[in-house]
Image: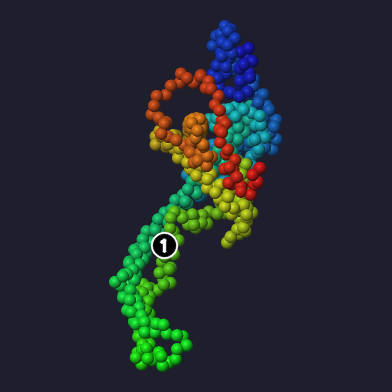
Amino acid sequence: MAGEAIRAEAASKNNPADLINVALEQLVQQGLELPAFSTLDRMAMSIRTEVNTDIFALVHRRIGGKDRAGLLRLVTTLGLDRKTLFNQLKQPAKRATWSHLKKLADHRRWLDELGDTEMWLEGLAAGKIADFAGEAEAADAAVLQDYAETKRVTLIACLLHKARMRVRDDLTTMFCKRVATKVKRARDELEEIRRQQHGIVEVLVGNYRTLLRQVDTDGPAQTARAKAGALTKETLDALEGLDEEALPGEVSRRLNRKVSAAFLKLSEGLMMQSNGLFSVTSVVDGFGGFAAQYDQIEKVSAHHGDLWEVLLHGHLKADRPVMLNLLENLDLVATSEDSRVLDALGHLLRFRNSRDYLPRQGQVTDPQMRRRVTAATNKVEAFNGFSEWVRFGNRGVIADNDPVEQEKAVKFNALLTNCLIFHNTLDIAQAVRELQAGGWKIDPEDLAEVSPYLTEKITRFGEYSTHELDLRPEAYEPHLDVDFTKLGSQDHPEASPAA
């Protein structure tokens, strides 16, 4: 019975202690007498060797002769640094400089050319592959050459598989860091533009103050307007009620035969109005003219707000070819049913040689897609912020330089973050049900504004107990009596109500 338990577990685990624990657990459950530890230890080692030997033979058969020879050459062929090519499988990612990114992309291509590890290792447990890769990584080329060929080839294949996955993670990380650096530079450029424009703003404010003084109540423009109005009114009062077909004699009589003087006053009033307007335009001319003022205003308004995206193009222009090559070489998979972002990237790659503009693609410029992409971006940023809040130890800095330990820290933090999100979601659902029981109507639009990234009721520096880990919680109710289909119809207004 112990042997059967060990054999079944040895297909996924490689540590003898784990195998012995499985056997002990099985014997205790059956109420059988426990053998000596040395007996279980010899049994675990023997069965593990048998299982691993079968795995080594299986992987060896799957790898073709040409690929197998290539793997074996890794531990015998020396590179330019006088080290075997096997050491290149172990290389970690370097700093996220552009030259390192290009070298890492070349390293990925070299790894992929060594063979299809997914096909070779199909069906093997992930834990087993990780253990074999760890054993190969801990050994050097001389040690591996002492192993049997089937074991040597399998260990190298597992290490190659791990290296292929790691290089893709490293490429993605370095790509994201590169983009983040470019975004920071674009923001810095925006701040520098704002600093330079501060002087222009001060000049415009001074110009506007001077212009207001011209047209204010006691200003020259208002004074000229008042005088022109008085002169014009004197003439119009004299002509009030005059028939349009009145004879010249009647007009002359009303103006005391001073027709010329009256029209001189009217002309003088119009001249006053013209001079008032001229006083305003002359002030603007003193500032450089209307065109110059409009130009300064446009310079300021062009970078109003946080519009750093328009400056990002200039920083990414030199990196465009390498970034497009990287996108072509990475296997991008949509994490939801909406594949329009990948469609947009495909459209970009198809017209990668277009220097000035891309042909219009309806889905790319769709306002609905913009809203969805913005919403998804906001969710990602909110999740990252919440994740950073959870990872409060050592101020969130991962001090270990081992990529494997770094990956563990990131994954464990993501696991803990998702557990807290799930906990908050259950609390929100319970609060909604209590409100509904009290007669409140819950609109999906209001509920959509509630974030699960809540921190108020979470005590990071609290008491942590493990005595309840074995308790099975009650099944939660995932259903909420809220019609969320309305939210979906907002993103797809063309869909019919039945859809």
Q: Name the foreground residue: 382 vs 399.
A: 382
Q: Is residue 130 above or below residue 35?
A: below
119 vs 34, left or right, is right
Quarter of the rendering occupied by the C terminus: top right
- On screen, residue 281 above or below 493: below
Please state if 443 lies on the left or on the right of 271 as rendered. right
Q: Nearer the viewer, residue 369 or 112?
A: 369
4 vs 14, nearest the viewer: 4
Q: Visible in this render: residue 136?
A: no
Neighbour class for label 1 at 10 Å: few (<14), some, many (≥20)?
A: some
Q: How is the image coloured?
A: rainbow
Residue drawn where x is 64% and y is 35% of the image = 117
Q: Quadrant of the N terminus?
A: top right
Kindly identify which residue carries mark 1: 300
> For residue 206, what is the image quadrant?
bottom left
Q: Is residue 45 above or below residue 279?
A: above
Is residue 32 shown to the viewer in this render?
A: yes
| Residue depicted at x 62% and y 33% | 157
Q: How many marks?
A: 1
The residue lying furthest to the left in this view is 218
Mark 1: which amino acid? Val
Residue 188 found in image quarter: bottom left
Look at the numbered disc 1 and give the secondary structure of its residue: helix
- The residue depicted at 65 percent of the width and 27 percent of the height is 56
**Residue at x 43% of width, y 68% of height:** 295
Residue 105: horizontal and vertical position, in percent? 57, 46
Return the x and y of residue 458 as percentages of the image width and height: 42, 31
Question: At which x and y percent is residue 65?
Answer: 70, 35
Left/right placement of residue 257 relative to residue 70 reads left
In the current view of this chain or complex, which residue is farthest to the top? 33
Q: Is residue 287 above or below residue 70?
A: below
